[in-house]
Image (spheres, rainbow, N blue to C red):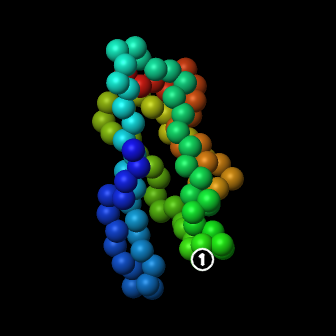
Amino acid sequence: ALAVRDTARQANGSYRVTYQVVVRNYSPVPLTHVTLRDTLANVFNSTTGAGYALIGSPTLSAGSQLRLNPAFNGSTEPVLVLPDSLSRLS
């Protein structure tokens, strides 16, 4: 599930939007090679008249065994969670 967690209007008229991603495994079997992708550029682009900039870095909940992709930018690199054997979802 992807949800807007918070929005804050900035002095320049733009908005700072914080997203929250919730990923759950409803199976009793742990999953490996878990990956998440989000192509922000599909929504925020010249066609829609909106742009975006990443501020800070994505974070994981305590105890998460997913592996964040440090190169994620929502455009040319849409992979948020790396799909390798160390990326687990129990």
Q: In the displayed image of the protein, which residue is found farthest to the top?
A: 29
Q: Amino acid at mark 1?
A: Gly
Q: Position of residue 30 (x, y in %)?
A: 41, 17
Residue 35: x and y in percent read: 54, 34
- In the image, residue 5 lies at what x, y percent? 32, 58
Tell me if I can see residue 86 in this picture: no
Residue at 33% x, 39% y: name it: 61
Residue farthest toward the right in the current orientation of the protein: 76
Along the viewing direction, whichever of 83 and 67 lies nearer the viewer: 83
Decide: is 30 above or below 70.
above
| Residue on which the image places disc 1 | 49
Q: Is residue 43 left or right of residue 26?
A: right
For image coordinates 41% across by 70% down, the residue present is: 16
Residue 30 visible? The answer is yes
Quadrant of the snapshot with the C terminus: top left
In the rendered view, does 33 fall on the left or right side of 66?
A: right
Question: Dot 1 surroundings within 10 Å: few (below 14), some, or many (20 or more)?
Answer: few
Q: Quadrant of residue 1?
A: top left
Q: Residue 84 occupies which quadrant of the picture?
A: top right
On screen, residue 79 above or below 5: above
At 41% from the left edge and 49% from the top edge, which residue is drawn?
Answer: 2
- The kind of secondary structure element at disc 1 is loop
